[in-house]
Amino acid sequence: MTDDPGKLLDKYNAGLCTEEERIAVESWYLKLSDTEAKNLDIASAARTKAAVWSSLTANQPAIKLNRFKYWAAAAILLIIGSIGYFYSKSSKVESIAVVSPKKHDIAPGGNKAFLTLADGQKISLTDANSGEIVKQGGLSISKTADGKVVYTVDDQHKNDNEGKTIFNTIETPNGGQYQINLPDGTKVWLNSASSLRYPTKFAGNMRRVELTGEGYFEVAKVHVPFVVKTIGQEVQVLGTHFNINSYKDEGDIKTTLLEGSVRVTQFGAHKNNQSKLLKPGEQSQLTENTINVKAVDTESIVAWKNGDFIFKGDDLKSIMNKVARWYDVEVVYKGDFDHLKFGGYISRSKNISAVLNIMESTGKVDFDIKGKLVTVSRVHK
């Protein structure tokens, strides 16, 4: 039996436990009272982790759950195992309801992207083998074993194409994400349905790239400003860590600063060209007419880059936008969901049912999966 409670719970939810481990987990779950299940939260889960493990290793009676009880147990264990929770608009943890297993399921996304070179050549990074992909204007473009695109400057050709600026574009589909190391050493993580246009060499007094969708940036610290352009704004930095969410279906463009400082400037027709300087832990929200700044929980903002979903009072449709992009599905709604909010923490490596089943366990919504179509229905009691 594994000696780490978090790994054991993850194994259980993935269906990878040995019989001994499965019995230990299920016997612990059955010992929870309704009150204990209802009052679980992040703090109590963290405080009781050692006690949970002690219970798991000390009590291993051969108790079997039926199929429906399994899903109820899985919902509770996801709450404990990831130290997270889901709640409705009242911001309180709901009692865990019985949730039936999904007849259909969808695997999560992965490292998928296309690289379009300046000459129009399009390369599938998903299918490309590790190693050098192509040479371009004194640069070697390689794919690493863990799925990153890296540019290496060939010293013998570092002055080639001086005065010329050529651009490449990397784009991720729905169900894809990718990391790229730009020629200056800047690291960029692209979320699903996103693209980044950038020069193959940074020259002059500005490093400028163009983003659509969502990207997380760790900008190399050199004495030349780095500018990220999206629709309606520019973000200028010297060296820092920040996230930009510019999806059209997310409404406002959100720029979140984790380290250093950035300046967000509004531009375009009918804009008033406002400019805001962000401090770490702050987020700017660009609306039609203004830039608003507020303090935010950065962990939940960049959870996607770290392989997780973290929702804290997010409305259902915002959550399902993220689910749709990552699992490459279409979502349709039956009912009124305007005031329904959830929170939670779960790995993006899980199948789609793991996310949907936990929201279903609140008894507020129901999900039906058919092929690539997910139908969301409101449950009224």
Image (tube, grey):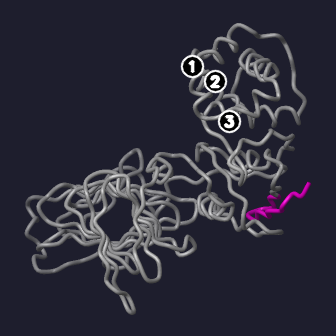
Q: Please identify, in this view, whether the residue under mark 3 or under mark 2 is nearer the observer.
A: 3
| In the depicted structure, whether residue 297 falls above or below residue 324 | above
Which residue is located at x 80 percent, y 19 percent? 31
Q: In x, y percent, where is residue 251?
A: 54, 74
Q: Quadrant of residue 190?
A: bottom left
221 relative position to 114: left or right:
left
* Amino acid type at image mark 1: Asp
| In the depicted structure, whether residue 307 falls above or below residue 369 | above
| In the depicted structure, whether residue 243 falls above or below residue 273 | above
* Amino acid type at image mark 3: Leu
Magenta residues, as a range? 368-381
Mark with earlier residue (1, 3): 1
How far, Cα to Cα, is label 1 from label 2?
A: 6 Å
Which residue is located at x 26 percent, y 70 percent? 227
Q: In x, y percent, where is residue 153?
A: 17, 59
Image quarter hosting the N terminus: top right
Residue that badge 1 annotates: 4
Asked whether the viewer can see residue 117, the reply is: no
- The residue most toward the top is 58
Residue that badge 3 annotates: 78
Characterize the local packing of mark 3: few (<14), some (14-19) or many (20 or more) Cα atoms within 10 angstroms. Answer: many
Which residue is located at x 63 percent, y 45 percent? 344
Check residue 184 for magenta coloring.
no
* Numbered disc 3: secondary structure: helix
Characterize the local packing of mark 2: few (<14), some (14-19) or many (20 or more) Cα atoms within 10 angstroms. Answer: many
* Amino acid type at image mark 2: Leu
Q: Quadrant of residue 322?
A: bottom right
How far, Cα to Cα, is label 3 from label 2?
A: 11 Å
